Amino acid sequence: MARISSKSNRDPLRQLGEAIRARRQACDLSQEALAHDAEIDRSHMGKIERGERNVTLLNILRIANALQCKPSDLFIDAEM
C-alpha cells in the first residue's frame, strides 16, 4: 500500500494532530475542554493530537467547530 506523502514528507496524521494541538493551545483550551466541546473522549483526543489515530471526517468537523474555525483551517495549519 502506497504511503500518502505530504508537502514536508512528514506523517499527515501527526501534522494534523500538531495543528489541532497548536490551535487548541492558542485558544487557551485544555485537551479535556476541547474533547468535551467536540464530544470526543479525552483519551481519544490525546491520540488524535499525537497522530496515533486516523481521525474521521465527523471528528474533524466536531473539532473545528469546537475550535471555532473551518476544517480547512486545520489542514492549512498542518501544511496539507
Image (tube, grey):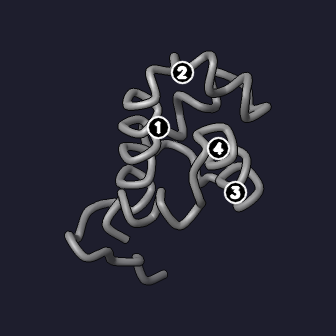
How would you rate the neighbour count of disc 4 (Cα within 10 Å): few for under 14, some for 14-19, many for 20 or more? Answer: many
Give coordinates of residue 54: x percent, y percent. Answer: 59, 54
- Of the two numbered discs 3 and 4 on the same chain, state the one appearing first in sequence: 3
Disc 2 versus disc 4: distance between alpha carbons? 11 Å
Residue beneath the point at 39% across and 27% down = 25
Q: Dot 1 lies on which element?
A: helix
Q: Dot 4 lies on which element?
A: helix
Left or right: where does residue 65 sit relative to residue 46? right
- Of the two numbered discs 3 and 1 on the same chain, state the one appearing first in sequence: 1
For the residues bearing labels 2 and 4, Cβ distance under 8 angstroms:
no
Image quadrant of residue 50? Answer: top left
The front one of 60 and 41 is 60
Image quadrant of residue 68? Answer: top right
Q: Which residue is mark 3?
A: 56
Give coordinates of residue 23: x percent, y percent. Answer: 42, 39
Three-letter amino acid code at disc 4? Ile
Q: Which residue is mark 4?
A: 63
43 over 4 or under it: above or below: above
Three-letter amino acid code at disc 1? Glu
Left or right: where does residue 78 sit relative to residue 8? right
Give coordinates of residue 62: x percent, y percent. Answer: 73, 46
Q: How many marks?
A: 4
Q: Which residue is mark 2?
A: 31
Which label sits in the foreground, 4 or 1? Answer: 4
Three-letter amino acid code at disc 3? Thr
Image quadrant holding the C terminus, namely bottom left
